[in-house]
């Protein structure tokens, strides 16, 4: 910033200096955004490696790093239904170098689950973009005696049944709560540190059932290692078209959709948010990513749902939807 010449009157020099300072600070965010990113970015995945959120984060980060010209480091931070990793990002510097690949659990259900949640998903993050959504599928261990949703409900009313999840407040836990309410069952909940751990427990016969994301269940369904009973969306999942919808299976109100989205800490400059949004959008036009998402049953959002504004509205709507159910079930902590 150039200094005013000493030959100018004092008042004029002061005025010129003030205008120069104002111009500097007004344009500082733009300059920061133009230079961004100048170093690698950390993308926190608040769940275990190998789970659906981790799979999508790694898939998109590869394309985004090429677009942005910097590497993206995936950091899996597990615990407390994803709230530990989300808290870390909420408290991070709002400079675009620490992001979180959150989901319905971390950015909606956590409000009802945790009495002293260290962050507010509606106020402590800058939404970037909805990345993908996927139906849940109800899987039973391969040797379970029930072979349909109706048979499972009848069996659970007279026998002890255990259901695994990715942890308190995760989408798998929420779908379990909804099923218990609709079916009138008292299935025992067994939380794990991520869906990959819960799925491994199911494959080992340690639990009876899980509501898993189609993303991670498809290979095991195709291999006959689990019994799929229903998907929780109005239409069948393209990757497992043989599995009926919950409505076709006799429980039309069993409707949940797992969504995954990218967030930055509150206060991250809008030009940086715009750059990240554009990088995600570009990834969604990559034929390799589109094909991979189709294979794993992850639906990419339509163009009108690829804005930060839409994601912000989605978060608020999901908080309002799930908080009452969580409280009714007494699932809060």
Image: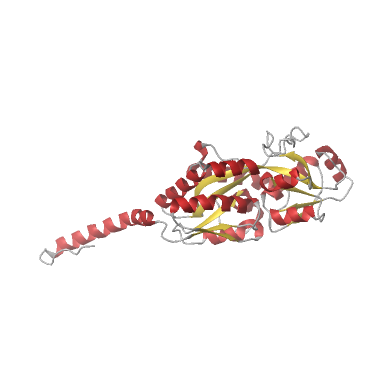
Q: Where is residue 312 in the image (x, y as percent from the top left)?
A: 52, 45
Compared to residue 2, the image places residue 169 above or below, namely above
Q: Which one is nearer the viewer's eye here, 122 or 75? A: 75
25 or 207, nearer to the observer: 207
Relative to 48, 89 lies left or right: left
Work out whether 240 lies above or below 93. Answer: above
Q: Where is residue 173 in the image (x, y as percent from the top left)?
A: 71, 50
Q: Image quarter for residue 207?
A: bottom right
Camera sees residue 297? no
Who's the residue at 74% across and 43% down the image?
Answer: 222
- The answer to which image quadrant residue 87 occupies is bottom right
Q: Outermost residue toward the bottom?
A: 6
The picture places residue 92, in percent across and down from the top left corner, at 50, 62
**Which residue occupies the extreme left position in the image?**
7
Position of the C terminus, as image quadrant, is bottom right
Q: In which quarter of the image is the N terminus?
A: bottom left
Does 333 sit left or right of 308 as displayed?
right
Q: At which x and y percent is residue 151?
A: 85, 39
Q: Is residue 332 left or right of residue 225?
A: left
Residue 109 in view in this figure: yes
């Amino acid at each position: 910033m150039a200094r005013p010449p000493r030959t100018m009157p004092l008042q004029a020099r002061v005025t010129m200096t003030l205008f120069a300072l104002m111009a500097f600070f007004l344009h500082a965010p733009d300059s920061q955004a133009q230079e961004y990113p100048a170093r690698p970015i950390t993308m926190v995945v608040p769940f275990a490696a190998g789970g659906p959120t981790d799979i999508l984060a790694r898939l998109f980060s590869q394309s985004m790093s090429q677009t942005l010209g910097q590497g993206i480091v995936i950091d899996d931070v597990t615990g407390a239904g994803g709230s530990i990793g989300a808290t870390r990002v909420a408290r991070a510097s709002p400079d675009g170098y620490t992001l979180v690949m959150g989901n319905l659990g971390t950015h909606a259900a956590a409000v009802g689950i945790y009495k002293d949640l260290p962050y507010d998903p509606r106020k402590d993050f800058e939404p970037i973009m909805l990345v993908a959504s996927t139906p849940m599928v109800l899987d039973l261990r391969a040797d379970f005696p029930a072979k349909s949703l109706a048979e499972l409900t009848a069996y659970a009313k007279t026998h002890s049944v255990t259901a695994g999840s990715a942890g308190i407040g995760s989408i798998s836990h929420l779908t379990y709560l909804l099923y218990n309410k609709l079916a009138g069952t008292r299935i025992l909940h067994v939380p794990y540190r991520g869906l990959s751990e819960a799925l491994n427990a199911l494959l080992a016969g340690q639990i009876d059932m899980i509501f898993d994301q189609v993303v991670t269940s498809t290979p095991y369904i195709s291999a006959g290692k689990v019994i799929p009973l229903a998907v929780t969306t109005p239409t069948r999942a393209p990757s497992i078209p043989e599995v009926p919808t919950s409505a076709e299976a006799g429980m039309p109100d069993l409707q949940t959709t797992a969504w995954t989205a990218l967030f930055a800490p509150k206060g991250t400059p809008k030009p940086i948010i715009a750059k990240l949004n554009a990088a995600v959008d570009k990834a969604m036009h990559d034929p390799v990513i589109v094909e991979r998402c189709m294979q794993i049953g992850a639906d990419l959002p339509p163009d009108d749902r690829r804005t930060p504004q839409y994601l912000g509205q989605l978060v608020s709507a999901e908080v309002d939807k799930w908080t009452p159910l969580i409280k009714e079930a007494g699932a809060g902590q």
